[in-house]
Amino acid sequence: MNHLLSLIPPQVFGVMALVGTYCFILAYEKQNYIQRLLQKGIETEGIVVELRPHPDRPTQGQAPVVDFSFPNGSHRHYSVTYASPSPYKVGQKVRIWYRFNKSNREATLADEVPGTLPKTLFIWGCVLCLFSYPVIVIRMLGLF
């Protein structure tokens, strides 16, 4: 085993550790994105203008499309939280939170969920870090 690890350049493990750590950071960011937007965003009222079926699995449910206004114009939010049956109806007024920066427009409904991306990033972070950090520590201690 030690012989195989010595064939791999140390920079490979450094990059794996860096990417794994970054995956952990992104997983945390994506997991808490909606909650942070609910706390720090501006609350307004929007109107459900459409219920979209899931693009890959139409039987999985529908997600609302919400139009809302803000001081400089209007925006259309496409939710990615699909539910069957949908708790929304076309024409329904809903509360929506938004935060617009120069290059980024964020909006969320109160019941949106972050999806599977945080979990996927967390798993990749675990795999990359569990393979890289032990090798880095062993090489730093001079054990091989």
Image: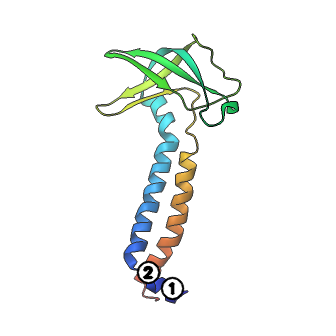
Residue type at the position of mark 1: Leu
What residue appears at the point 68 percent right and 33 percent down from the top-left corner? Answer: 60
Q: Position of residue 48 (x, y in %)?
A: 54, 16
Relative to 131, does residue 108 appear above or below in the rendering?
above
Answer with left or right where residue 84 lies relative to residue 110. right
**Quadrant, the N terminus:** bottom right
Farthest-out residue, top = 91
Q: Position of residue 106 (x, y in %)?
A: 42, 30
The local secondary structure at tag 1 comes to helix
Please state if 22 lies on the left or on the right of 54 as rendered. left
Contact check, label 1 and label 2, Cβ < 8 Å: yes
**Residue appearing at x 53%, y 59% in the figure:** 124
- Is disc 2 surrounded by few (<14), some (14 to 19) or many (20+) residues within 10 Å? few
Residue 24 to residue 13: above or below: above
Q: Which residue is mark 2?
A: 8
Residue assigned mark 1? 4
Q: Is residue 122 left or right of residue 21?
A: right
Q: Is residue 134 above or below residue 21?
A: below
> What is the spatial separation of the Cα atoms under label 1 and label 2, in whole angstroms?
7 Å
- Choose between 128 and 143: the one closer to the eye: 128
Q: Residue at x 47, y 24 (%)?
A: 77
Q: Residue at x 52, y 43 (%)?
A: 31
Residue sitting farthest toward the left: 102
Label 2 residue SS: loop
Q: Where residue 30 appears, x then y in whole percent?
A: 49, 43
x%, y% of residue 108? 49, 28
Disc 2 marks a residue whose amino acid type is Ile
